[in-house]
Amino acid sequence: MSEAAANPGGRRLAGRVVLVTGAYGGYGRALALDCAREGARLVLLGRNARKLERVADAVEQSGGEALLYPLDLEGATPDDYAELAARVGEATGRLDALVHCAAVFPGLTPLEHTDPAMFARIVHVGLTARWWLTQACLPLLRASAAGRVVFTVDPLPRQAPAYWGAYGVVQRGLEALAATLQAENPGLGVHALPLPPLRTPLRARAYAADEDRLARDPSGATGACIALLATEQGA
Ligand SMILES: NC(=O)c1ccc[n+]([C@@H]2O[C@H](COP(=O)([O-])OP(=O)(O)OC[C@H]3O[C@@H](n4cnc5c(N)ncnc54)[C@H](OP(=O)(O)O)[C@@H]3O)[C@@H](O)[C@H]2O)c1
C-alpha cells in the first residue's frame, strides 16, 4: 500500500517515531508539537520530568502521542544510551528520526575567561552526548526506510565567532560530525540544520529580548526540519 493510501489525511509523518532532545526548550517544544500535528509519535527527552509532562500534555491535546524519557545528558553514559535505544525499540518497535535540540549556552564570554568546567559541559552536552545518543540509536534508525538524524546548529558563531566560546566550537564540530556520519551511512539522512535566530531562553542569554528585532517565534521555524523528516529516502 502506498503511503498516501495508508495515510488519507495527508499527514507527512504518519506512522513515524521521532525522538526530540531538549523537548521542553524553545525550539524542541515547537518541533515536537508540529511533528505530532504531522502524525508522528514522539519520544520526548529532557532532564526535568515535570516540564516534559507539560509538553506531552500539549502533544496529546493536539491529538498526538508522546513517550517521556527523562535523562540528564550531562551525566548519562553510553550504557544509559544503549538502554534508551532498547527501551524505545521495545515500546514503539521503531525509531525513524532523532532530532537533537538540547544545548548549553551560558552567554557571550571571551574564551580566556570561560570557566574550565563550563567549557567541558558545553562540549559534552552539545557534541559528545549528541554523538553517544546517535551511536546507540543507529541500528534502529538504519532499520527505518526513512531514517533521519538532525543536529540543529547555530550559524551565528560562524559569521561572527568572537565571544561564542565553546558553544561556537560545538557548532563547527556538529557540521563535521554530520558530514562524517552521512559519508559513512549513505542510506540515512544526516543533517546539520542551521536555524534562524529564535526567541528562546538560549538566545536571551546573548541578546536582550526587548532589543532583539531578528529573533522570531520558534513555532514558525519548524518547517525546514519537518521537510527533512518527511522527504522520501534519497530525495
Ligand atoms: N535560539 C536561537 O536563536 C537558535 C539559533 C540557531 C540554532 N539554535 C539551536 O537550536 C537548538 C535549541 O535551542 P533553543 O534556542 O531552543 O534553546 P533552549 O530553549 O535553551 O533549549 C535547550 C534545551 O536543552 C536542554 N538541555 C540543556 N542541558 C541539558 C542536559 N544536560 N540534559 C538534557 N537536556 C539539556 C535544556 O533543558 P534545561 O532547561 O533543563 O537546561 C533545554 O530544554 C540548539 O541546538 C541551538 O543551538 C538556536
Image (tube, rainbow, N blue to C red):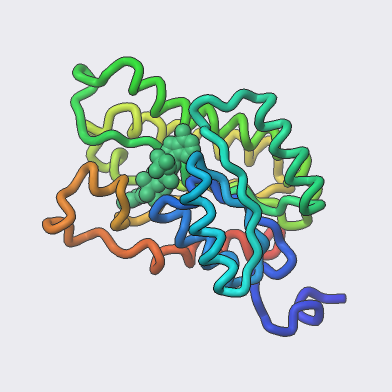
Q: Residue at x 29, y 45 (%)?
A: 156
Can residue 151 be seen here? no
Which quarter of the rendering shows the N terminus? bottom right
Q: Residue at x 61, y 29 (%)?
A: 132
Q: Residue at x 82, y 76 (%)?
A: 2
Which of 124/33 is in front? 33
Task: Give the residue at the far left of this rendering.
Answer: 211
Task: Give the residue at the far bottom of this rendering.
Answer: 8
Left or right relative to 100: residue 119: left
Q: Quadrant of residue 87?
A: top right
Q: Position of residue 108 (x, y in %)?
A: 21, 34
Which of 144/23 is in front? 23
Which quarter of the rendering shows the C terminus? bottom right
Which of 83/212 is in front? 83
Q: Quadrant of ligand 1?
A: top left
Left or right relative to 209: residue 223: right
Q: Residue at x 56, y 74 (%)?
A: 62
Q: Position of residue 95 (x, y in %)?
A: 72, 51
Q: Quadrant of residue 136?
A: top right
Left or right relative to 51: residue 81: right
Q: Position of residue 85 (x, y in %)?
A: 72, 39
Does residue 64 lie above or below 23 as drawn?
below
Does residue 226 lie above or below 1 as drawn?
above
Q: Position of residue 13 (x, y in %)?
A: 66, 67
**How many discs appear?**
0
Task: Give the residue at the far right of this rendering.
Answer: 1
Can residue 200 be seen here? yes
